[in-house]
């Protein structure tokens, strides 16, 4: 899921984005074809795992969103830890730009959505939907540009998207949580303590972390907090390296092993299951209603203004520097790409609303805002000039 400088790395990012796009398009085709009822019935089918009284029974859609996506969040957590310890976020001077950009890129879309939906208490539950950036799509679109975009800008976008995901995870934990089971939370805390002990004693095998992580997931699932949080917590406990042996820990290996599965299987399955928008019942009023407008404007305008405005302010103040070799126009185009919300925006939208009519409006707004951000961002970047002359990187 992370961009690489090699041609193979770029090809992988492009390929994973195309697979994700194909899955979303296929979902739209199924949802608007004679197979629509079969498509919806399949994802509403209940599947039971385990034997009573220790059995879990959920719809296939819920298994995808509550269990399969845990692996996606596990990889996100691994990326966050690696970047914080050794990557683009390990040095304060390098981290300040994506951190501030991500904060601005979360605040501005939420404010725009809230302003548009201010008089609708139910719709306000979706305030965080446009605050998220889709790593795969955003980095994939930039990867299509190849050498037209300097590597530093790709690193900036990846770091920004990772911080953005961390923000989305915190939002899910604090604002989209149902009634809490303190017994389940206590058991989850016990599991987390075991994970911390494994880390403390430098356990370098992956299996113990995954087994205890599965226990934490089950407890969090029963607690009322969204289960995907367990994936992130488990990831943060997995060692990056051994301080005593001076060798790499299981984190890097696990991330590399899981990333292809997440990029080419889990995220496409999520897209296919959740992007199916039936267009036959959508009227002009639905398309122009508050929720889809708030999401679309939040993603396209809010992300652009929030990211670029925050970053420009930091650079102008002298607290941060332009990514080396990048022009202001390229930075602006990158900010626009931050408005590709897709996976995370859909995920938050499905947590915010259960009414099928409202979730349809969420899908419409997310797709409209993400598509507009992808197309306009790509056009801005593909028509950008080359790197500015040496010495002109800082904004005056």
Image (cartoon, rainbow, N blue to C red):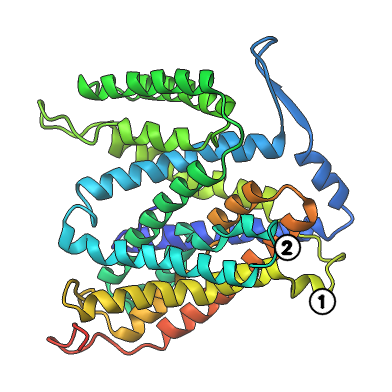
Query: Residue at 61% across / 40% down in the picture?
Result: 65
**Mark 1 neighbour density, 10 Å: few (under 14) some (14–19) many (20 or more):** few
Q: Nearer the viewer, residue 301 or 155?
A: 301
Q: Nearer the viewer, residue 189 or 245?
A: 189
Query: Residue at 43% across / 25% down in the picture?
Result: 213
Position of residue 333 in the picture relative to residue 240 (left or right):
right
Query: Residue at 55% across / 27% down in the picture?
Result: 223
**Mark 2 neighbour density, 10 Å: few (under 14) some (14–19) many (20 or more):** many
Helix, strand or loop under label 2? helix
The percent coordinates of residue 307 (x first, y second) are 39, 72
Q: Which is nearer the N-term, disc 1 or disc 2?
A: 1
C-alpha gap between disc 1 and disc 2: 12 Å
Q: Is residue 259 visible?
A: yes
Q: Is residue 370 visible?
A: no
Q: Quadrant of residue 335?
A: bottom left
Q: Quadrant of residue 41?
A: top right
Q: Quadrant of residue 386?
A: bottom left
**Which residue was labeled with disc 2?**
361
Q: Nearer the viewer, residue 357 or 337?
A: 357
The percent coordinates of residue 99 (x first, y second) are 30, 61
Above or below for 389 versus 90? below
Above or below for 99 versus 332? above
Q: Which labelled disc corresponds to residue 162?
A: none
Count of all numbered marks drawn on residues in the image: 2
Query: Residue at 10% across / 26% down in the picture?
Result: 245
The percent coordinates of residue 78 (x first, y second) are 34, 41
**Which residue was labeled with disc 1?**
284
Above or below for 41 versus 120? above
For the C terminus, the quadrant is bottom left
């Amino acid at each position: 899921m992370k961009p690489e400088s090699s041609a193979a790395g770029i090809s992988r990012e492009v390929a994973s984005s195309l697979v994700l796009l194909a899955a979303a398009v296929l979902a739209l085709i199924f949802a608007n074809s004679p197979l629509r009822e079969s498509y919806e019935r399949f994802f509403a089918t209940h599947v039971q795992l385990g034997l009573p009284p220790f059995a879990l029974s959920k719809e296939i859609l819920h298994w995808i969103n509550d269990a399969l996506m845990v692996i996606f969040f596990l990889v996100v957590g691994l990326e966050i830890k690696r970047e914080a310890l050794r990557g683009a976020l390990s040095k304060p001077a390098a981290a300040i730009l994506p951190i501030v950009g991500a904060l601005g890129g979360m605040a501005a879309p939420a404010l725009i959505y809230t302003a548009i939906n201010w008089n609708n208490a139910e719709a306000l539950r979706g305030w965080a939907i446009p605050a998220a950036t889709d790593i795969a799509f955003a980095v994939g679109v930039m990867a299509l540009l190849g050498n037209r975009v300097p590597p530093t800008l790709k690193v900036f976008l990846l770091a920004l998207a990772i911080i953005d995901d961390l923000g989305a995870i915190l939002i899910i934990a604090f604002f989209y949580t149902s009634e809490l089971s303190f017994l389940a939370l206590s058991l989850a805390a016990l599991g987390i303590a075991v994970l911390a002990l494994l880390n403390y004693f430098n356990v370098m095998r992956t299996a113990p972390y995954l087994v205890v992580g599965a226990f934490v997931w089950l407890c969090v699932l029963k607690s009322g907090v969204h289960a995907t949080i367990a994936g992130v917590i488990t990831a943060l406990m997995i060692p990056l390296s051994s301080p005593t042996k001076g060798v790499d820990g299981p984190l890097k290996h696990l991330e590399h092993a899981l990333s292809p599965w997440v990029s080419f299987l889990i995220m496409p399955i999520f897209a296919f299951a959740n992007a199916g928008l039936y267009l036959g019942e959508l009227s002009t009023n639905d398309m122009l209603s508050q929720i889809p407008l708030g999401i679309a404007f939040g993603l396209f305008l809010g992300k652009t203004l929030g990211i670029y405005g925050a970053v420009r302010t930091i650079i102008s103040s002298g607290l941060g520097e332009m990514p080396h070799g990048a022009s202001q126009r390229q930075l602006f185009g990158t900010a626009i790409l931050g408005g590709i919300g897709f996976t995370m925006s859909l995920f938050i939208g499905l947590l915010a609303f259960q009414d099928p009519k409202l979730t349809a409006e969420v899908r419409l707004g997310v797709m409209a805002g993400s598509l507009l951000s992808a197309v306009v961002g790509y056009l801005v970047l593909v028509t950008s000039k080359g790197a500015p002359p040496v010495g002109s990187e800082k904004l005056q």
